[in-house]
Image (tube, helix red, strand yellow):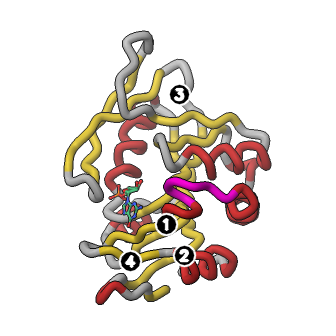
Amino acid sequence: MVNNFPVLVERIKQEGKSLEGGILKVDSFINHQLDPDLLEQMSAEFNRRFDPASYDKIVTIEASGIAPAVMLGYLAHKKVVFAKKKKPSTMSNMLVTEVFSFTKNTTYQICISGEFIHAGERLLFIDDFLANGKAANGIIDLANQAQAKIVGMGFLIEKAFQQGGSLLREQNIHVESLATIASLDNCTITFA
Ligand code: 5GP
């Protein structure tokens, strides 16, 4: 089940920092500064793991999911729609749900216009991290509201010591993570 992508594992070993509270800081190549060459390699790996014929559209959440989602969308020739964290006053036919943020310890709303996800559409969700699966569940809720179907979920980094991965796999969702972290105890990064 664990299928680590060596290029990403190496980069995390070189530049990732394990913070207090089980948080991995990867600001130098995922969450703040971006490395397009690495993004292209990671998205090509997603493109090998998710058959483009199996989904119609990619969904993600702003901000950090957008870069890998767009890169995959470019490679797979799929449209990308990102859930917004602020409700735009101009959005019509809005689908809304609540998500609890693990890193910020607050609940926030995410929304997608019903113009961009449709009944019967097959969606692939791409995001930076999988922790407790709250963001992923929010996307499942939005897809349900639109009567669309989530056919897969791809994460750059899964923290296997939190329960998101098992919760999603129990629902028979095809989950792929490019790097799975077994532990961040003692500020040490241990891969699964
Ligand atoms: P979940 O919704 O699965 O509980 O948490 C996933 C979201 O929380 C991700 O979209 C990411 O923004 C954030 N997150 C969770 N864990 C970490 C972490 O260890 N490092 C960083 N940078 N973000 C995280």
According to the picture, the residue beneath numbered tag 1 turns out to be 26
CA gap, disc 3 and disc 4 = 41 Å
Q: Which residues are magenta?
A: 30-35
Label 1 CB less than 8 angstroms from ligand 1:
yes
Label 4 CB less than 8 angstroms from ligand 1:
no
According to the picture, the residue beneath numbered tag 4 turns out to be 18
Q: Position of residue 130 (x, y in %)?
A: 42, 63
CA gap, disc 4 and disc 2 = 10 Å
Choose the circle earlier in sequence order: 3 or 4: 4
User: Could you tell me which secondary element the residue under label 4 belongs to?
Assistant: strand
User: Could you tell me which secondary element the residue under label 1 belongs to?
Assistant: loop
Looking at the rendered structure, the kind of residue marked 1 is Val
Q: Nearer the viewer, residue 15 or 138?
A: 15
Is residue 78 positioned above or below 47 on the image? above
Looking at the rendered structure, the kind of residue marked 3 is Ala
Looking at the rendered structure, the kind of residue marked 4 is Ser
Residues packed near mark 1 inside 10 Å, few (<14), some (14 to 19) or many (20 plus)? some
Looking at the rendered structure, the kind of residue marked 2 is Glu
Q: Nearer the viewer, residue 184 or 93?
A: 184
Q: Are marks 3 and 1 in contact (CB under 8 Å)?
A: no
Residues packed near mark 2 inside 10 Å, few (<14), some (14 to 19) or many (20 plus)? few
Q: Which residue appears at 57% of the width and 32% of the height?
A: 120
According to the picture, the residue beneath numbered tag 3 turns out to be 119
